[in-house]
Amino acid sequence: AVDRFRAAPFEAPADARPDEGDAAAHAADRFVRVCVRKRPMFAHEREQGEFDAVTCLPGRVVVHDARMHPDMRHMFMNHHDFAFDEAFGEKVGNDEVYAGTARELVSVALAGQCGTVMMYGQTGSGKTYTMSAVYERVAADL
């Protein structure tokens, strides 16, 4: 069911994301942006039969929730859709994550203003990996 979902043509609902021109025009006016980065599955997770239950799409994350019908014989899949300012899939590199999240804050800081990047997530979800990459790129841009 997850593979069928990912293979289907994707079209965002009309109200899911603002027009790109509108988003760019209003980005500077926003005080808080929420971005998500999905880490790749570990080999041991795949070996244990876990499945990839999250799909990242532009500005969206879809969580695939496998459920059992009350008859306890048939399974079905719910797809829960969540909107974010940015959603980075497991194949997105650190340069793109930095450009889409923290790069703008360097110019803000150089102009004498303040900016903060916060990371939140479960232990082992990749916060240190991502933040280390952000630190390196901030230092290079300064």
Image (spheres, rainbow, N blue to C red):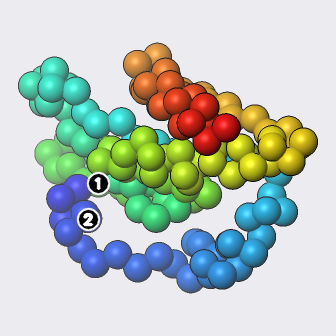
Count the marks: 2
Q: Which residue is labeled 2 in the image?
A: 5
Residue 55 shown left or right of residue 107 in the figure: left
Position in image of residue 137 (x %, y %) = 54, 37
Picture quadrant of residue 90? top left
Closer to the chain start, of discs 1 and 2, is 2
In the rendered image of this protein, does residue 38 appear above or below residue 41?
A: below
User: Which residue occupies 26% across, 65% down?
Assistant: 5
The residue to which callout 1 is attached is 77
Q: Amino acid at mark 1?
A: Met
Is residue 11 depicted above or below 123 in this figure? below
Residue 31 % position (x, y): 82, 51
**Which residue type does callout 2 highlight?**
Phe
The x and y percentages for residue 74 are 17, 50
Would you say residue 80 is visible in this rendering?
no
Residue lying furthest top in this view? 123
**Element type at mark 1:** strand
Q: Nearer the viewer, residue 112 or 36?
A: 112
Q: Residue furthest left?
A: 47
Q: Residue at x 20, y 69 (%)?
A: 7
> Can you give x and y, in whole percent of width and height, for residue 96 in the image?
45, 51
Determine which of the numbered discs, if any, sits on residue 20 in the image: none
* Residue 41 visible (yes or no): yes
Report the Cα–Cα distance between label 1 and label 2.
Answer: 10 Å
